[in-house]
Image: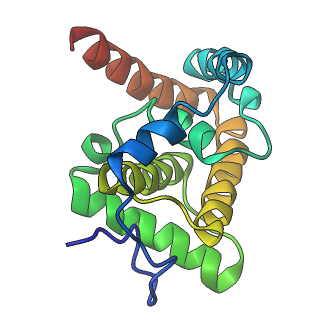
Amino acid sequence: MDLVPFDSGRIVGAPTRLDPVVADAIDDFLDDDCERRLMDWIAKVRHGDFAAIPAVVTFEEACAVASLIDGFGVAGGILESFAIGNRAVGDILRFGRTRASALDAWIAVHGWCQAHRRGGLPPTEEDAILLRRLVGHLRVCLNGLSAKQKAGIMSTIRREDALQSRR
């Protein structure tokens, strides 16, 4: 069964399985300079400089931001994560924007990226546009957090860093 990233009342971008060799070639596509720039701003985001998130991101950049948290764990599971993502994407499709909180937007970005990565699904142009809009919303939300809200997000990022360092 193919995994459809989010059900918004219609299928967004007909998903197809991507050959693993092709998927690896796409992952290797980033040149060293591009990868270095990506790692530079991701390091800043990891330390709370949310303004470092570019205004427009690629799929790889969105997935790098998404990987800073365990969206499935934070949401309480995969189904809960996709439900949060469905609401955010549905809002964008219906109203042109979403009211998702920073954490819900991050969970939605995480779920979207995981659906494509785990399913071997290349993002369609429509998928990429929706993902950019979600990350743009996430960027705005993160930069508008109160000190207490930012501390909560930073705690979530540190928890994921700690889990990753044990693996």
Rendering quarter of residue 47: top right
Return the residue found at the far right.
55
Q: Is residue 107 above or below residue 36?
A: below
Q: Which quarter of the picture shows residue 44?
A: top right
Tell me if 145 is positioned left or right of 86 in this view. right
Give left or right: position of 144 versus 55.
left
Task: Give the total of numbered labels.
Answer: 0
User: Which residue is at 71% across, 33% downward?
Assistant: 53
Mark yes or no: residue 40 visible: yes
Q: Is residue 42 above or below residue 132?
A: above
Q: Give 2 or 21, whichever is nearer the viewer.
A: 21
Image quarter where the N terminus lies is: bottom left
User: Residue placed at 72% from the left, 24% from the top?
Assistant: 34
Which residue is at 50% across, 36% downward?
A: 27
Above-or-below relation of 118 to 69? below
Relative image position of residue 15 (x, y in whole percent): 41, 72
Q: Quadrant of residue 49?
A: top right
Q: Residue at 53% x, 61% y: name it.
A: 123
The answer, for residue 66, to whether it is visible in the render is no
Image location (x, y in percent) of residue 81: 32, 57
User: Residue 147: horizontal and vertical position, in percent?
Assistant: 62, 26
The front one of 25 and 43 is: 25
